Image (tube, grey):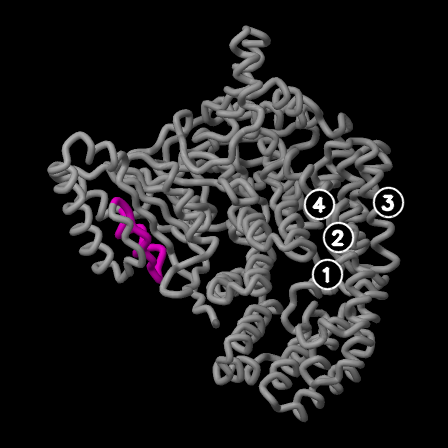
Amino acid sequence: MQQNRQLAAILFTDIVGSTTMMQKDEQAAVAINKHYVDVLKETVSTHKGEVLNDYGDGSLCIFSSVTEALRCAMEMQHKLQTEPKVPLRVGLHVGEIFFEHGKVFGDGVNVASRVQSLGVANSILFSSEVCSKIRNQQEFKSVSIGRFHFKNVDEPMEVFAIANDGFVIPDKKNIEGKLKENKNSAKRKWLISIGVLIFAAISFFLYNYFLTGNNIKSIAVLPFINGSADKQNEYLSDGIAQEIISQISKINSLEVKGWGSSIFFKNSDKSLKEKAEALGAQEIVTGSVEKDSDRVVIRVELTEANTGKRLWGEEYRRQWGDILNIQTEVAQKIASALNGKLTPKEKLDLSKHSTENVEAYKFYIKGKYFWNKLGQENIDSAEANYKKAIELEPEYALAYAGLADCYSINFKGISQLELVPIAKIYAQKALSIDSTLSEALTTLGFIQQNFDYAWADAKTNLERAINLDPSNYEAHINYGLALMYSTSDKQGALRELKKAVDLNPLSYLTNWQLSRNYYFAGEYDLAIEQFKKTEIFAAKPQKSIPLWSTGLIYLKQSLFPQAKEIFDNLPQGNALQLDNNQVMQAYGYAVLGDKTKAKSLLEETMKKYPNLANSNYRYSQVYVALGDFNEALNQLELGYGNRDVHMFWINVDPAFDPIRKEPRFIALLKKMNLD
């Protein structure tokens, strides 16, 4: 029987203590239930939802819009506070549902039910998937109540509560619900009961509460102003801002937005509030840097974005040699201003410097400045500056990590087969100096999955990178990719990628990774929505990538006229693009049935760009669509040998569904440890 599947905003309701109410006063309980049913039907209808299941003291409803679902929940709770008051809890999630024999099923239904189970009377709780869709909507105020391990859900999930006036936010300490049982709880209670290590146990629990509770603040560091007379000192103002990001990322009570999004507002005239809303940040750090000879003046200010209230600010007039201590001091002051409690480990981590050689440090931040600009010339400059830093400080782990990044992508006109082993050596050198370096663990994990196809090792290193720095959005991206391509945990993969977007919301690459993997997970509506956001952040050469990606989705949805319009209007590609538009145009035409045109476009591109890097995978897609499976497999085998950067998509890309049972394809998956 074919299942009717759809993506929906799922709303669960439950009357708290309904059985007890019925036992105490049956007549009053009936009146409460009638009030609830009347309000439920009215509000769900008003907000264009549908009541699928009515359980008497609760219900399952679906909506096509997350916004309407939340508005319905809030209106419902307001109306239920009139007499006779109904103690209702509400839970929401976004997910796929399907129907069989008139009943509704799906993981999304289970998750919504478990989120609701954590609630209390007059509360509205929702998942991070819902939170990501309302982040910039001012009508909804929300707060995280922590991460929870639900029954029958593999990964812990972050849950949020509506914090608008009139609604109750559950106290995390007293939350109960459909959670996994802690196997160690009995042993822990016994230890506490006999007084063994009471102080240590209490400290442990308090530490975890402050780590995972409501105290996590979202903060962004904007590009600092270069106040020096020498405009070439801009690398200092950018570099110091980035280093402050690195420092405060060591504080677990802070969620720090990535530099890739903060740089979006360099020289912007938007208000602090507008910048904070775009970044999803509660607090903003701004500042300026002036350097004259051996003197430096650094001004830093911390502002509450919503109110404009200045929380802390200071001016440092010091010798350049004191720059590293200033950054530590700034991080500590920010934590203090936000009422953050630094753990002994965090204090120790903040006091440690990656180098004591300030001249080596200067070359390192200059290298990072050029690295962020990308482009061949800038990567060359980044490499040169990282190497100068190492000349001055041979045990400079961060500089080795920077070199590893340079060699992990195509530059110098050298093939990836030659470059990546060098990158791996640099990453391992960095870790031999500092095994806790999140940046180097991230690069090593990227190499292990993208080049070595050593998925287990990659996941281990990326998990460690995230544990060491939860704000490392690149580690979240790569861990999400490892889960997507080498496991069946697609929802876990999407959670990691969504977390990366939360941390780096204005980055083209971060948004594109989430978009692309919605497509691989079969979440086509979410993929189209995300590709539209991605296009906003794309530079001109990248603008067409979200377009043809949307065309691929239309092909999968059999929306052929819409797909044809996109492929007909794609601009001409060029050899500098990672994905050549003309090749994807050929794929589109092949699937649409115009195989003559598709073959002509493919042959023209292959002739024009005979040595186009990372092209074998793309060529193979077209050959599959043309029905030439033998040549498609030839191209895939070449891509494996050349370490085409797209190859690790092979396990989830629907373009290869027609050849998945081919012996050569199965053998290739085995080589890539994906069998």
Q: Amino acid at mark 1?
A: Phe
Q: Earlier in the sequence, mark 3 or mark 4?
A: 3
Q: Tell me the amino acid under the disc marked 3.
A: Ile
Q: Is residue 30 left or right of residue 366?
A: left
Kindly check if marks 2 and 3 are in contact, taking CB atoms under 8 A apart as contact: no
- Mark 3–mark 4 distance (CA, rounded to whole Å): 19 Å
> Which residue is under mark 2?
449
CA gap between label 2 and label 3 equals 16 Å
In this rendering, does residue 25 appear at all? yes
Give the quadrant of the C terminus: bottom right
Q: Which of marks 2 and 4 precedes in the sequence?
A: 2
* Residue 88 colored in magenta in the image: no
Q: Earlier in the sequence, mark 2 or mark 3?
A: 3
Sort mark 4 into few (<14), some (14-19) or many (20+) by Cα contacts within 10 Å. many
Q: Measure the C-alpha gap from mark 4 to mark 2.
A: 8 Å
Marks 3 and 4 close (CB-CB < 8 Å): no
Q: Nearer the viewer, mark 1 or mark 3?
A: 1
The reply to whether residue 269 is visible in this rendering is: no
| Residue 425 marker | 3
Image location of residue 353, percent across then percent down? 71, 26
